[in-house]
Image (cartoon, rainbow, N blue to C red):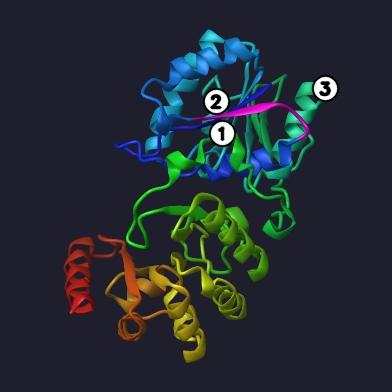
């Protein structure tokens, strides 16, 4: 028996669909029994996990960990669970363990770390542990050497193509608790249709995860999932949590055409320079299919800083303004993010970027 745990991800316990665990669960269906526990849904997740382990006899606990609130909760919680249930093997995965597997393994309560996109590796690890086999040769696995106690990591496994993976097992959770109101619609659910990003911004954790790879579900598959969410759960908006949804213009345009009849709103993340290359026809399709807002990393009001971020080859302050004007023409809201306090003069960078933000808003 396996327990998959999603630590609390925000102070307000906003329920966000635990897609990382659903992705693991999709490959575990028919292979082993498992249960998903979401820390955003419980005031005392330690009590819930303790009870679940006792009632099910679970011997494995998989935890997805982002830096920030999830790490803040996962650290003491797993320490306590290990003390309460020393027989349970604890496995961490996600962005923080991928980047800092040594710290995780040295904690004393994390037994294994699955690094990178770990669906296939996690399935293989679970099978090995349940059968008593040695898992230490698996790609993407980090572990402690039994003789020296040193942390070791194998090379990352290949990124699985989302188009070859099974659909999320939504029946494993109470999906209705994750439907929420957003700018796009009053009944919104998320989906994740692609892995990775082809760019190399030097502040981004995605780069170390995928090294410039981008793999996506087909436009047809993505539209089918969207249609299923609409028809089964009566939603009227979808957020795509892809690192970069809009990499391939042809895929975006086809997806927009395929959902045109749904009458929904939708949202995704993109690059400024990528969207500026889109044709007017694609912009019309996106608008008419319900695209309401796009999240964009504008980052700064300085071309020199963009260059230092390794975005300067294709991005510029001027391009950000050009895209904002285009989006205004099409009625699509630009949701821009900025990084304040960059070197070499952090105070000046803050002032200049805030001045640029005011210009963008105008």
Q: What residue is disc 2 on?
A: 106
Q: Which one is nearer the viewer's eye here, 19 or 63?
A: 19
Q: SS for tag 1?
A: helix
Q: Which residue is mark 3?
A: 131
Give the quadrant of the N terminus.
top right
Q: Residue furthest bottom?
A: 280
Q: In the visual, does 220 lie left or right of 300?
A: right
Q: Quadrant of residue 141?
A: top right
Q: Which comes sooner in the sequence, label 3 or label 2?
A: 2
CA distance separating discs 2 and 1: 6 Å
Q: What element does badge 2 sit on?
A: loop
The reply to whether callout 3 and callout 2 are in contact (CB within 8 Å) is no
Query: How many discs appear?
Result: 3
Residue at image coords 69%, 54%:
159
Find residue 112 and report its horizontal and vertical position in percent.
64, 29
- Mark 1 sits on what residue? 102
Looking at marks 3 and 1 on the same chain, the residue that comes earlier in the sequence is marked by 1
Note whether 201 is above or below 206 in the view shown.
below
């Amino acid at each position: 028996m396996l327990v998959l745990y999603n630590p609390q991800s925000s102070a307000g316990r906003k329920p966000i669909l635990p897609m990382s665990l659903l992705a693991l669960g999709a490959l575990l269906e028919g292979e082993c029994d498992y249960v998903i526990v979401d820390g955003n849904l419980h005031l005392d997740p330690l009590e819930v996990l303790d009870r679940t382990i006792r009632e099910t006899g679970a011997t494995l606990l998989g935890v997805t960990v982002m830096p920030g609130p999830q790490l803040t909760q996962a650290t003491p919680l797993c320490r306590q669970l290990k003390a309460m249930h020393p027989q349970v093997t604890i496995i961490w995965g996600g962005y923080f363990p991928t980047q800092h597997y040594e710290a995780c393994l040295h904690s004393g309560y994390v037994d294994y770390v699955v690094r990178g996109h770990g669906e296939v590796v996690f399935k293989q690890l679970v099978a090995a542990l349940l059968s008593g086999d040695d898992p230490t040769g698996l790609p993407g696995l980090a572990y402690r050497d039994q003789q020296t106690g040193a942390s070791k990591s194998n090379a990352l496994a290949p990124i699985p193509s989302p188009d070859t993976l099974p659909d999320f097992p939504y029946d494993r959770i109470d999906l209705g608790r994750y439907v929420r109101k957003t700018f796009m619609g009053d009944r919104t659910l998320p989906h994740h249709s692609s892995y990775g990003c082809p760019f190399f911004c030097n502040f981004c954790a995605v780069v170390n995860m995928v090294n410039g790879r981008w793999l996506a579900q087909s436009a047809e598959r993505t539209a089918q999932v969207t249609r299923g969410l609409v028809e089964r759960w009566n939603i009227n908006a979808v957020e795509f949590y892809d690192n970069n949804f809009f990499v391939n213009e042809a895929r975006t345009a086809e997806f927009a055409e395929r959902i045109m009849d749904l009458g929904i709103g939708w949202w995704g993340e993109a690059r400024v320079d990528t969207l500026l290359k889109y044709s007017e026809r694609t912009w019309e399709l996106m608008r008419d299919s319900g695209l309401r807002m796009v999240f964009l990393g504008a980052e700064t009001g300085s071309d020199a800083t963009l260059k230092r971020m390794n975005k300067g080859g294709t991005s510029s302050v001027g391009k950000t303004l050009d895209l904002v004007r285009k989006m205004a023409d099409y009625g699509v809201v630009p949701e821009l993010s900025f990084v304040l306090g960059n070197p070499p003069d952090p105070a000046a960078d803050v002032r200049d970027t805030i001045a640029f933000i005011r210009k963008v808003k105008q």
